[in-house]
Image (spheres, rainbow, N blue to C red):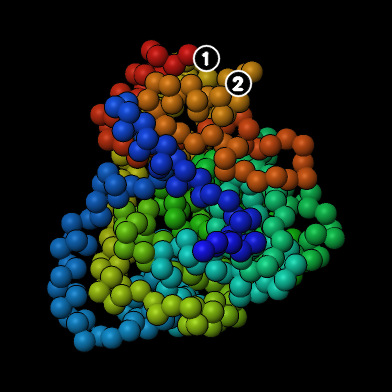
Amino acid sequence: MKIEYSNILNQGGKYVFDVIEKEVARLRAEGIEIIDLSVGDPAKVDPPPDFVINSLSGFAEQRKYGGYPRCKGDQAFLRSCAQYMKREFNVDLDPEAEINITIGSKEAVFHFPKVVVNPNDIVICPTPGYPPFHLGTIAAYGVPYYVPLYEENGFLPDFSAIPSDIAEKAKIIWINYPNSPTGAIASLEWYKKLIDWAHQHNIIIAADEGAYIEISFEEKQHSILEITKEGVIAFYSLSKRNNMTGYRIGFAAGDHQIIEGFYRLRSQQDNGVPQFIQEAAILALEDTDFIKTMRQSYKIKREIIMDAFQQKGFPPSKSEATFFIWQKAPEGMSGSELAQRLLEIGIVVIPGDALTQPTTFEKNPGKDFVRIAVMPTIADIKKAAERICNDLVI
């Protein structure tokens, strides 16, 4: 029987991280010692906090007659999210009206356009950027409009350069700070300008901010919700803050009208997050020690890799946050060429152009870069640095 995939699925292409995982498996099967700096999954190296793991069986026993979980999220979990946002960002949220649980953030980001997008509506997406921004738009029959993140703009989208006819038709603009893959952060001043522009054009700001918001090294990243909730929805996840990637839990917060629409969508497509996972997540959100230790570990590992590239004569990376390094290739070499050179010495990274989409601008914003994820152990990070300094041919 011949199976033909839908136009929506075909437009998405292959998920870049799946491709990378297959390449790593192939090289290892050939006996090549690989240091994988490609995929940002911290739980493959460091587990969640012990108190999370140790609590699960007890919570599962308590909830064994719980039935389907509440799609919006248990009230205790919603309150813990509100308390977290107040503690970390001084943002006041109504747990019932302005917060909704999510199954991590990936599925929430992917499905959110369905809340407001009709066929052929425009959604503004950064490039390079998280693939679900544009793939979710396509799945909602919307049209992505890509805005490049250039080094000269601090890897911030220049929304003032978006043509007025695009702005008038756009329903959503996606932003992501701290940014994957560039590691850039956004200031409150920039957020204020973005909000003024978005309100002027009646565009919803969808901020995928919560994955890395506590992984910054020089100054704390602000939440856009510190300025306003009107016309804004922000997505949070415990995957990176607490290494709970496999637990699939997070939350969305913001404008009560947007959250209501998001809840209506979610109530039709899933039954929420298991209650015992929510109980463990409450403990994780209350804790502040684990993230401090993890942040320091990332800082050390980043500095080792960044120093190795600088010793080799590479341009210094301007990454300020996340566990990613957005490393620029040397003059005359593309990011894809650099990724291949690194692969030859057993180091796997992602070429920047694999994370970018076509724009109306001439310059591909990812062409000169590679994305490096400092996930391995300190020992393997040091080994990678030695290979970069001693074996990398440029």
Residue neighbourhood size for the residue with mark 2, other residues' Cα within 10 Å, grouped as few (<14), some (14–19), many (≥20): some
Residue at 53 percent across and 20 percent down: it is: 314
Label of residue 333 in the image: 2
Label of residue 394 in the image: 1
Please state the horizontal and vertical placement of residue 6, each as a whole percent of the image: 61, 64
How far is the residue under mark 2 from the one under mark 1?
Answer: 8 Å
Report which quarter residue 56 is drawn in: bottom left
Q: Nearer the viewer, residue 122 or 78?
A: 122
Contact, mark 2 vs mark 1 (Cβ under 8 Å): yes
Type of the residue with mark 1: Ile
Element under disc 2 = loop
Q: Nearer the viewer, residue 20 or 315?
A: 20
Type of the residue with mark 2: Met
Using the image, determine if residue 16 lies above or below residue 91.
above
User: Which residue appears farthest toward the right when viewing the image?
Assistant: 165
Label of residue 245 in the image: none
Residue neighbourhood size for the residue with mark 1, other residues' Cα within 10 Å, grouped as few (<14), some (14–19), many (≥20): some
Residue at 54 percent across and 62 percent down: it is: 3
Please state the horizontal and vertical placement of residue 114, each as a whole percent of the image: 61, 73
Element under disc 1 = loop
Residue at 37 percent across and 53 percent down: it is: 240
Q: Nearer the viewer, residue 296 or 17?
A: 17
Tell me if residue 28 can be seen: yes
Using the image, determine if residue 41 lies above or below residue 142.
above
Residue at 57 percent across and 36 percent down: it is: 352
Report which quarter residue 68 is drawn in: bottom left
Please state the horizontal and vertical placement of residue 259, each as a whole percent of the image: 54, 77
Using the image, determine if residue 85 lies above or below residue 351.
below
